[in-house]
Image (cartoon, rainbow, N blue to C red):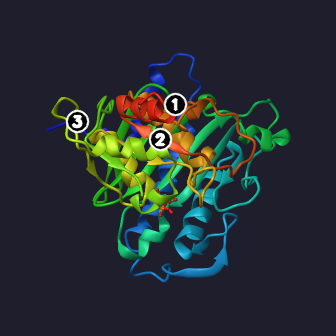
Amino acid sequence: MNKLITIERHFVEEQKRHPQATGELTDLLYDVAFAAKLVRREVVRAGLADILGMTGTTNVQGEEVKKLDLFANERIINAIGQHGRFALMGSEENEGTIIPPKNETGRYVLLFDPLDGSSNIDVNVSVGTIFSIYRLTGDDPKKADINDCLQKGSRQVAAGYVIYGSSVMMVYTTGHGVHGFTYDPTIGEFLLSYENITTPARGKYYSINEGSTEQLNEPTIGFLDWLKKEDEATGRPYSTRYIGSLVADFHRNLLTGGVFIYPATKKHSEGKLRLMYEANPLAFICEQAGGRATNGSKRILDIEPADLHQRTPLYIGSREDVIVAEEFERGER
Ligand code: P6P
């Protein structure tokens, strides 16, 4: 019988391994795990509660907002904001920054996508919550402002996601490996199920919306053709797997190996996915698992952000596959 290690116990054990740790990050991660349990409770019964469907409003992205998006957003803000550990928050659902209900002593910033892929929720496809944590750039929580949110991804102190799928999992990193926890509803705990996740150097899947092929540049089309060619030595052709829910596609490729691509297209000239609360946290996790994440030419974690909701092309997953994609983008293949 494997040891039953709750995510909270894992946070504490991780903290003990770093003598300089103050315990603050452990408390932050407690808060995030608690909020994830609240969101999970509603997501897994979404078809029964009156939280499906549209709110009749649109968010800052111009996208229709689903009731569950708003529910998840409010739950995370209130459940996490009440402990005073975060000075500032940024959410995909909110145009500006959010000052949590209690922020007097907060020394951290939380950026999050409360329910990514929510357009899939009505048809029972996996969706996810993605989060990213930074330290304040200054010492006074009262002086926290947008600049504390606009830090390069390489300055994250923690990142993770929750995937609400056939089972509910929470995956996180604090820069010391990637660890996955599966929710056991019989005891209401996230239990360690994948310690020190590493992603294969080369994958077996590629994930892209092939419906956009006519909107892609020649190098990206060249890369897709390369992935589909027969070549035993490199395990090609890869199989295509595209759920249309970023966390689900990323999580599968993280465990099995593969590459997810959302490039610039005619419709999304800067890419569709958001840098601060999608690409950066997943890039931190991916690199910690031995993978690679770029915008086609530049490391995601090195991109200097200019806007809370800015978008970026995203090539993320198995290291060797992303390198090949970059070689196509540089015209070297
Ligand atoms: P497309 C969901 O709306 C999302 O933001 C991501 O979860 C997903 O990877 C992507 O958009 C899918 O976009 O254009 O292929 O439908």
Camera sees residue 249: yes
Residue 217 percent across, percent down from the top left: 52, 48
Are circles 1 and 2 on residues that touch, CB within 8 Å? yes
The residue carrying pointer 2 sits among few (fewer than 14), some (14 to 19) or many (20 or more) residues within 10 Å by Cα, namely: some
Are circles 1 and 3 on residues that touch, CB within 8 Å? no
Residue at mark 3: 3
Relative side of 260 to 105, left or right = left
The residue carrying pointer 3 sits among few (fewer than 14), some (14 to 19) or many (20 or more) residues within 10 Å by Cα, namely: few
Q: Residue at x 68, y 44 (%)?
A: 86
Residue at mark 1: 330
**Label 3 residue SS:** loop
- Spatial CA span between label 2 and label 3: 48 Å
Image quadrant occupied by the N terminus? top left
Relative side of 178 to 152, left or right = left
Label 1 sits on what residue type? Arg
Where on the picture, by quarter, is residue 168? bottom left
Q: Nearer the viewer, residue 257 or 72?
A: 257
- Looking at the image, the residue that sits furthest to the right is 143
Q: Nearer the viewer, mark 1 or mark 3?
A: 1
Residue at mark 2: 219
The residue carrying pointer 1 sits among few (fewer than 14), some (14 to 19) or many (20 or more) residues within 10 Å by Cα, namely: few
Camera sees residue 191: no
Q: Nearer the viewer, residue 67 or 301?
A: 301
Label 2 sits on what residue type? Pro
Q: Residue at x 46, y 27 (%)?
A: 332
Q: Earlier in the sequence, mark 2 or mark 3?
A: 3
Relative side of 53 to 9, left or right = right
Label 3 sits on what residue type? Lys
Q: Is residue 101 above or below residue 16?
A: below
**Label 2 residue SS:** helix
Q: Nearer the viewer, residue 274 or 155?
A: 274
**Label 1 residue SS:** loop
